[in-house]
Image (cartoon, rainbow, N blue to C red):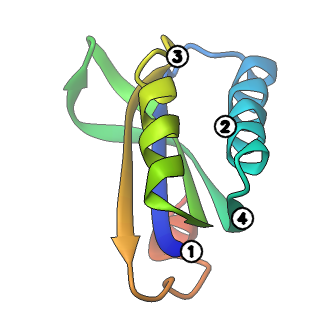
Amino acid sequence: MNKFEVVLIFNPELSTTNLKSEIENFKTKLLSQSANIVNEEDWGLRDLSYNINKFKKAFYNFFQIEASGKIIKDINNELNQSENLLRHIFIKVNEHQELPTILNYEKK
């Protein structure tokens, strides 16, 4: 299994219930395909560096996972279909960084 760090950026207009539902759906997709969620952090509502779909803020979530490349490809295709997800990125790493991250400390 390869190690990945994932950042999901969600629509800032989502209600708390819908945001939690989207995150749970992501976790369920991972676990149903035999991926392992090592850690996760909620970075909260943050300013974007540039506007995305006319939004200036978004909800950020960070995950450390272990999965095969095939699983990542399948999940990536599913995430591309989500209307509530503004951006996402999977980064393959040799070792997961230590938590909590600096962004978690800066959380407003």
> Which of the marked residues, 3 or 1, is nearer the chain's N terminus?
1
Vertical relation: 107 (above or below) 57: below
For marks 4 and 1 on the same chain, the one whose residue lies earlier in the sequence: 1
Q: Can the viewer see residue 108?
A: no
Q: Nearer the viewer, mark 4 or mark 2?
A: 4
Q: Which residue is at a point 55% across and 72% down the rendered structure image?
A: 105
Residue 26, which numbered label?
2
Image spot of residue 2 (x, y percent): 49, 74
**Residues under numbered marks 4 and 1 in contact, where contact means CB atoms less than 8 Å apart:** yes
> Which mark is nearer the camera, 3 or 2?
2
Residue holding disc 4: 36
Horizontal side of 89 relative to 6 (left or right) equals left
Mark before the other along the chain sequence, 2 or 1? 1
Three-letter code for the amino acid on which mark 1 is drawn: Met
Q: Residue at x 35, y 63 (%)?
A: 91
> At 61% from the left edge and 78% from the top edge, which residue is drawn?
100
Residue type at the position of mark 3: Asn
Q: Mark 1 = which residue?
A: 1
Nearer the N terminus, badge 4 or badge 3?
A: 4
Amino acid type, mark 2: Phe
Residue 15 sits in which quadrant?
Answer: top right
Check residue 24 in the rendering and tell me which mark sits there, or answer none.
none
Residue located 43% across and 58% down the image: 69
